[in-house]
Image (cartoon, rainbow, N blue to C red):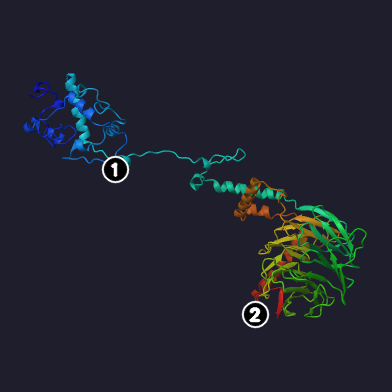
């Protein structure tokens, strides 16, 4: 006898299987699939339905299902003809897969009764049998795979690292995330242009280069020297033979020496800074201690050398106890001897300046009143070569970073930068002064130099530019005789006829003192902006504008007219002459007369 009888069976639990494949979601479980082939249902071919009592006993005999998902290697493979009861996954995992949480496998979520599906009124036993049969078919025919479900799930989530936006201390600034995509900032260039314009204007507003005036000399300052190791110590020699030692930090004179009778023509320090040398119109060379005498002692030189002629300049070797003087000839001296080691001359006119090369220390150069610039090799004790210019050169200065480069201050209002390997053409002609250039000195970086002129001004030139970037002047400052750039590359000193030594900033708008990190960042940012927009007409005009005294301004206009007249005359000569008869000479080669080796 079959249970339930046919007249009480619902359409869901029909004894006759529907047509089609035998494995599906609605396929009833047969006895052969359950593994019991000896029952009557298997012989007759009818489906066997599990009673509630059998279902309860089966649940008691099975172990408690694990909530941990099966590994991919042990995942069951279901399909047509597979053994559903032997390979089905844990019921809790199937419930989680199909219904979102672990459920009782007897009654899945969303299925309260069989009457919900069939719409018929069945007894409790029949409903229980229908639920059991339906759940068994769902488990048997579900394609369960942990790896497959993992690849199908897509989760989007935000991940923020606190190190990117959290301050380390409360004193730090808040970190603001920024997107530098140019498409999101269409007005970036106009905004930077306005910032560059404001930075350029503020630079001119805060351009106050003058720092201090050191007065005390009773005659014009004729020469200056720097201490090689102490930035605050400066030496100066005057036209009355007086030498003073200054402290720039305190801005006062710490020592006064009456060194010579007449002019102090030159002054230099020893490479170690323990002593200094002076030469004057009294034909003597004197060596002095850098430290003053003891209490009650008189000021006396360490050594005194009496020469035969007037010495007009002196310079000390950068590494050895050797110094050079110039006058009628160039003499090389040892500090422990009273006679020169060697004497070198080329010509008959007096030599006004001599300078040692700071890199190739055996090389030295001199300039004479016969318009010559002569280079010497101390190892051979002979001159190497000389270049003859249109007018006389007052002094030269070697570049501290490039061994072959030197700059000459000339009487024709210009400065000439030469490469000693090719003296026939200057590397650059620097033009801005309106009177004779008397002195020149390089910055320790080797990128700029400062010049002193008879036109009562000093100018700062980049080595690769023909025009000056800065001009300093005051109402009281007269003819500037000497100039020096300090060893820290921040300050400039000049000595002039009105007996004063003036201290200037190398960068006119630079803020002195300690800068905070934000000030440094703002300074660097403004500098980059000014470099980026430096060729824009409005910014270029503001950056180049300088106030000049009326005398200098009128002379500039006059020289401009004269230069234009000479250019026009040269163009007319070439225009009305036979082609090739009038050579075209560049501005650099116009002032070089000859090179003699």
210 horizontally vs 21: left or right: right
Asked whether 186 or 45 is in front, the reply is: 45
Please identify the quadrant where the C terminus is shown.
bottom right
* SS under mark 2: loop
Residue 286: horizontal and vertical position, in percent?
Answer: 86, 69
Q: Are marks 2 and 1 in contact (CB under 8 Å)?
A: no
Q: Tell me which residue sits at (74%, 79%) in the image.
A: 383
Asked whether 315 or 92 is in front, the reply is: 92
Asked whether 524 or 301 is in front, the reply is: 301
* 487 over 46 or under it: above or below: below
Q: How many marks?
A: 2
* SS under mark 1: helix
Q: Read off the residue under disc 1.
A: 72
153 horizontally vs 226: left or right: left
Residue 302: horizontal and vertical position, in percent?
Answer: 86, 68
* 114 over 223 or under it: above or below: above
Residue 379: horizontal and vertical position, in percent?
Answer: 72, 78
10 Å crowding of disc 2: few (<14), some (14-19), many (20+): few
Residue 270: horizontal and vertical position, in percent?
Answer: 79, 66
Q: Read off the residue under disc 2.
A: 581
* 220 over 94 or under it: above or below: below
Residue 454 in view of the camera:
no
Quarter residue 331 falls in: bottom right
Quarter residue 593 falls in: bottom right
Q: Tell me which residue sits at (26%, 41%) in the image.
A: 75
Q: Nearer the viewer, mark 2 or mark 1?
A: 1
Asked whether 351 or 69 is in front, the reply is: 69
Please identify the quadrant where the N terminus is shown.
top left
């Amino acid at each position: 006898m079959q249970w339930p009888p046919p007249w009480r069976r619902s359409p869901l639990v029909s004894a006759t299987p529907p047509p089609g494949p035998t494995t599906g979601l609605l396929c009833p479980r047969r006895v052969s699939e359950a593994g019991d082939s000896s029952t009557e249902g298997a012989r007759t071919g009818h489906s066997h339905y599990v009673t509630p009592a059998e279902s309860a006993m089966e649940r008691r005999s099975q172990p408690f299902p694990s909530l941990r998902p099966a590994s991919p290697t042990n995942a069951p493979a279901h399909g047509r003809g597979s053994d559903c009861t032997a390979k089905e996954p844990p019921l809790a995992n199937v419930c989680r897969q199909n219904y979102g949480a672990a459920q009782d496998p007897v009654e899945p979520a969303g299925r309260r009764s069989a009457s919900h599906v069939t719409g018929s009124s069945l007894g409790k036993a029949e409903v229980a049998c229908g639920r059991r049969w339906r759940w068994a078919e769902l488990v048997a025919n579900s394609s369960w795979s942990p790896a497959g479900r993992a690849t199908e799930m897509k989760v989007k989530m935000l991940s923020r690292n606190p190190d990117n936006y959290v301050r380390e201390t409360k004193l730090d600034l808040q970190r603001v995330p920024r997107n530098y995509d140019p498409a999101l900032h269409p007005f970036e260039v106009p905004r930077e242009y306005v910032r560059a314009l404001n930075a350029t204007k503020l630079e001119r507003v805060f351009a106050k280069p003058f720092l201090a005036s050191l007065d005390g000399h009773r005659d014009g300052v004729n020469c200056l020297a720097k201490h090689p190791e102490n930035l605050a110590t400066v030496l100066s020699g005057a036209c009355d033979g007086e030498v003073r030692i200054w402290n720039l930090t305190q801005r006062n004179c710490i020592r006064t020496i009456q060194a010579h009778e007449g002019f102090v023509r030159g002054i230099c320090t020893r490479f170690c800074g323990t002593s200094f040398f002076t030469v004057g119109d009294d034909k003597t060379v004197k060596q002095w201690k850098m430290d003053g005498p003891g209490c009650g002692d008189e000021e006396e030189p360490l050594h005194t050398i009496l020469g035969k002629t007037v010495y007009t300049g002196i310079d000390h070797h950068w590494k050895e106890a050797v110094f050079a003087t110039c006058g009628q000839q160039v003499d090389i001296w040892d500090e422990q001897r009273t006679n020169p080691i060697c004497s070198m001359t080329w010509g008959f006119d007096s030599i006004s300046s001599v300078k040692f090369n700071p890199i190739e220390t055996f090389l030295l150069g001199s300039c004479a009143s016969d318009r010559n610039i002569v280079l010497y090799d101390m190892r051979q004790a002979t001159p190497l070569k000389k270049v003859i210019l249109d007018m006389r050169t007052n002094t030269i200065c070697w570049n501290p970073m490039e061994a072959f480069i030197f700059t000459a201050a000339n009487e024709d209002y210009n400065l000439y930068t030469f490469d000693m390997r090719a003296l026939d053409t200057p590397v650059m002609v620097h033009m801005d002064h309106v009177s004779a250039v008397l002195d020149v000195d390089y910055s320790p970086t080797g990128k700029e130099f400062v010049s002193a002129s008879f036109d009562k001004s000093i100018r700062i030139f980049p080595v690769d530019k023909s025009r000056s970037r800065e001009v300093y002047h005051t109402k009281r400052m007269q003819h500037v005789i000497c100039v020096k750039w300090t060893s820290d590359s921040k300050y400039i000193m000049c000595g002039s006829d009105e007996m004063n030594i003036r201290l200037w900033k190398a960068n006119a708008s630079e803020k002195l003192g300690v800068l905070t990190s934000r000030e440094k960042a703002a300074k660097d940012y403004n500098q980059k902006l000014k470099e980026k927009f430096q060729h824009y007409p409005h910014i270029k005009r503001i950056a180049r504008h300088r106030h000049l005294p009326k005398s200098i301004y009128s002379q500039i206009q006059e020289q401009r007219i004269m230069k234009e007249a000479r250019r026009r005359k040269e163009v007319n000569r070439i225009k009305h002459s036979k082609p090739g008869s009038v050579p075209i000479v560049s501005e650099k080669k116009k002032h070089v007369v000859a090179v003699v080796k």
